[in-house]
Image (tube, rainbow, N blue to C red):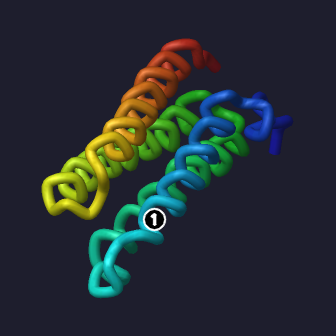
Amino acid sequence: MGKMKHNFRELKIWQESMNLAQEVFLQVKSFPAEEKFGLSSQLKRAAISVPSKIAEGSARVSGKHFIQYLETSLGSLFEIETQLLLARQMDLLEADDAEILINKTQELQKMIAGFIKTIHD
């Protein structure tokens, strides 16, 4: 196995996705107990997936394989955005809190999409 091209801990996309995951976890604490295994659980899993896939992909020597993991993390971000919109519609999140998280999610989507464009074997 060759040397990793990217140290995931140094990647801004990983750092920002860790911050987003932490914020999602803090917000879902306020969800009602009946959402523990529903939307709350889904949001937390998707939020964990983003930095996890970035880290896992960074271990791939091939840029092509890393991109696949980045695309999976991008998919999870769209999942998070959808779930946040639903949480807002269901009054599980305050409008301001939802807007902040949605904006961070969209910004991270742009960052990852931009990073994907820079990767070459």
Q: Crowding at label 1, few (<14), some or many (≥20) Cα neighbours within 10 Å? A: some
Query: Would residue 95 appear left or right of 100 to someone viewing this image?
Result: left
Query: Would residue 43 appear left or right of 12 to someone viewing this image?
Result: left
Above or below — where is 118 with respect to 48? above
Question: Looking at the figure, which quarter contains the C terminus?
Answer: top right
* Residue denoted by label 1: 44
Q: Where is residue 84 in the image (x, y as percent from the top left)?
A: 29, 51
Q: What residue type is labelled 1?
A: Lys
**Residue at coordinates 45% horizontally, 59% vertically from top-left?**
27
Could you tell me how many numbered marks the image carries?
1
Question: Looking at the figure, which quarter contains the N terminus?
Answer: top right
Q: Position of residue 61 (x, y in %)?
A: 71, 36
Picture quarter containing residue 11?
top right
Q: Label 1's element?
A: helix
Q: 54 or 59, which lies in front?
A: 54
Picture quarter containing residue 71?
top left
Above or below — where is 119 with respect to 64? above
Q: Where is residue 32 in the image (x, y as percent from the top left)?
A: 32, 79
**Residue at coordinates 52% horizontally, 62% vertically from top-left?**
25
Query: Would residue 42 appear left or right of 9 to someone viewing this image?
Result: left
Q: Residue furthest left?
A: 89
Above or below — where is 85 with respect to 9? below
Picture quarter containing residue 86?
bottom left
Q: Position of residue 95 (x, y in %)?
A: 27, 44
Q: 59 or 78, which lies in front?
A: 78
**Residue at coordinates 54% horizontally, 51% vertically from top-left?**
23
**Residue at coordinates 38% horizontally, 62% vertically from top-left?**
43
